[in-house]
Image: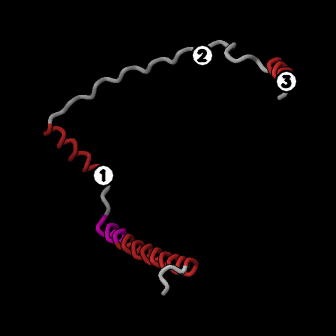
């Protein structure tokens, strides 16, 4: 096999050597975060209630409409996959002849 030493030398002459540039300075470590303040169970439940009050809850109408849409999509998806499954079963039976007597 032919040696490619002349082309290696030409490539080395064209490109700078790796590692000859000045090394990058080390990254500064981020400042340490203070430990979170521990709270008791009563304080925790109070904070949970306060956060729950801030939530924008859906109205009854929005909840009903969303629930109905979910049920409709479940029915549509189940019909689609039933049709696809039956079509694939028919094609496999047709091609392989499995299940015919």
The residue at the far bottom in this view is: 101
- Observer-nearest residue: 36 or 100? 100
The residue at which mark 2 appears reads as 24
Give the percent coordinates (x, y) of residue 55.
Answer: 30, 52
Residue drawn at (15%, 34%), measured in percent from left and top?
40
The residue at which mark 3 appears reads as 7
Q: Earlier in the sequence, mark 2 or mark 1?
A: 2
Is 97 situated left or right of 32 in this image?
A: right
Image mark count: 3
- Real-space CA distance between mark 3 and mark 1, rounded to the nearest whole angstrom: 69 Å
Specify whether residue 63 is painted magenta.
Answer: yes
- Observer-nearest residue: 80 or 10? 10
- Observer-nearest residue: 37 or 6? 6
19 versus 1 height, above or below:
above
Label drawn at residue 79: none
101 versus 7 height, above or below:
below
Q: Nearer the viewer, mark 2 or mark 1?
A: 2
Q: Residues within 10 Å of mark 3 (few under 14, many from 20)?
A: few
Q: Nearer the viewer, mark 3 or mark 1?
A: 3
Q: Residues within 10 Å of mark 2 (few under 14, many from 20)?
A: few
Residue drawn at (32%, 71%), measured in percent from left and top?
64
The residue at which mark 1 appears reads as 55
Q: Which residues are magenta?
A: 59-67
Q: Secondary structure at mark 3?
A: helix
Q: Nearer the viewer, mark 2 or mark 3?
A: 3
Residue drawn at (54%, 76%), measured in percent from left and top?
92
Is 46 situated left or right of 23 in this image?
A: left
85 versus 3 height, above or below:
below
56 versus 8 height, above or below:
below
Give the percent coordinates (x, y) of residue 3.
Answer: 83, 24
């Amino acid at each position: 096999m032919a040696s490619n030493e002349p082309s290696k030398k030409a490539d080395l002459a064209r490109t700078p050597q790796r590692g000859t540039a000045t090394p990058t300075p080390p990254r500064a470590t981020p400042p340490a975060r203070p430990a979170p303040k521990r709270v008791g169970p009563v304080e925790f439940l109070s904070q949970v209630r306060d956060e729950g009050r801030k939530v924008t809850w859906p109205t009854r109408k929005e909840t009903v409409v969303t629930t109905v849409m979910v049920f409709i999509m479940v029915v549509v998806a189940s019909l689609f996959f039933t049709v696809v499954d039956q079509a694939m079963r028919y094609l496999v039976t047709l091609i392989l002849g499995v299940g015919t007597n």
